[in-house]
Amino acid sequence: MKLQTRHERKIMTNKPNNNLKTLADWRGLLTTIEHAMQGFSAKQAAAAMACAARENALTKPAGSLGRLEDLSQWFYKTRGVYDNISSEKLLSTILVFAGNHGVAVDGGVSAFPPIVTAMMVKNFNDGGAAINQMARWTNAKLNVISMNDLQPTNNFATMTEPTPAMTEEKFCQALKTGFDAVDKNTHLVVLGEMGIGNSTAASAICHCLYGGDVAHWVGRGTGINDETLAHKQSAVAQGVAQYQKLFAGKKGLETLQFFGGFEMAGIMGAIIAGLYHHIPIILDSYVTVATFACLTSCFNDSTHVLAGVMTPHCPQGWHDKAAEKNTAYQDAYHGHAMLLKQLGKEPLVDLGLRLGEGTGGVVALQILRGALQCHHGMATFADAGVAEKTN
């Protein structure tokens, strides 16, 4: 099968600046993407209509496959082309970005020391992690990317001068690494992460972007005790206070630069590449979705940005109203659930997944494969000679 290239599909007429060395360069690229996506909406509408037309002609009552029908349409609408990519033809990539965080170097925010990041990267490369098994299950390409040689960021929660986790130069380099990691010819990308302390960074981002009670954003992550949880909450509150001194009122790239890890910057760069090439993106965890939340703040209208990115799962309790009153549930999961609601995203599955390395994204990928298999494999009423509904 010959894949359509970006040029053949005429998705984007402008090429990104190969330098992209400053925040101004990246803002310029995001402006280009936003304008291009507005012009691309007609192609998206046509692809969605073609997909819906076939869906409505299949041998089943209309809408009887529920959200599977929505998934097929999401896939083709995001890409802006209805080109018969069945389950067997789907080329998918899992990108797992790994990085270390200065806020975790001295301990106090995680149940595990930062050295575990490197240990888990080795485990990924040796094929021993959960995501390795999931990649084999779905026949997806897995690429694990160690950011900044796993050297930690600065500690954003320092009590002295406001200190961004990454310098502008380092941040932009990490964005570019993530952008370049996305193959423009792939059909779909799942993004995962590994980094001791990165749920602290995610919590700080959410508290900075949306405010509210810091305790609602800061969870137990890897299973920390009460003392560590209190320290983690304090670090987030201190970091947000320092951020306001330096970037008061600003939200977007600066938010991720100040709080995020190099792996989170890589994830943002990969999401930007997905937007640029019109590749559907599936996010996995609280950390990846918090990264995405920073990006949505960079656009005048984030509607198109939100549409092409799926946040497929939430830890257990999303649909359980009683769980919202349960302290243990709030401690473990509340931030992730609140963030999805802020973004207007409803998860596909509620399996209690909170590993982060991409496992929940791969579950969603398999559900999408099922949707595409039905969409292209089923007979239409005309093909099967089955009488259609008369009223």
Image: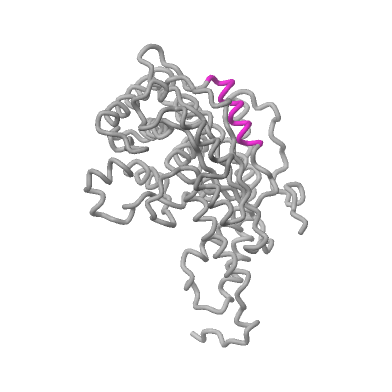
The N terminus - image quarter: bottom right
Q: Position of residue 271 (x, y in %)?
A: 57, 41
In the figure, is residue 219 to the left or right of 273?
Answer: left
Quick one: which residue is furthest to the top in this view? Answer: 160
Whether residue 169 is in magenta: the answer is: yes
Name the residue nearer the viewer: 134 or 200.
134
Q: Residue at x 63, y 69 (%)?
A: 376
Q: Position of residue 111 (x, y in %)?
A: 35, 32
Is the residue 8 above or below the residue 32 in the image? below
Q: Which residues are magenta?
A: 167-180
Name the residue nearer the viewer: 355 or 274.
355
Q: Residue at x 27, y 46 (%)?
A: 329
Tell me if I can see residue 368 in this picture. yes
Instruction: Classify residue 181 by image quadrant.
Output: top right
Is the residue 154 above or below the residue 183 in the image? above
Whether residue 150 is in magenta: the answer is: no
Q: Residue at x 33, y 38 (%)?
A: 223
Q: Position of residue 253 (x, y in %)?
A: 51, 29
Q: Main secondary structure of the magenta part?
A: helix
Name the residue nearer the viewer: 206 or 44.
206
Tell me if I can see residue 271 in this picture. no
Q: Position of residue 308 (x, y in %)?
A: 55, 50
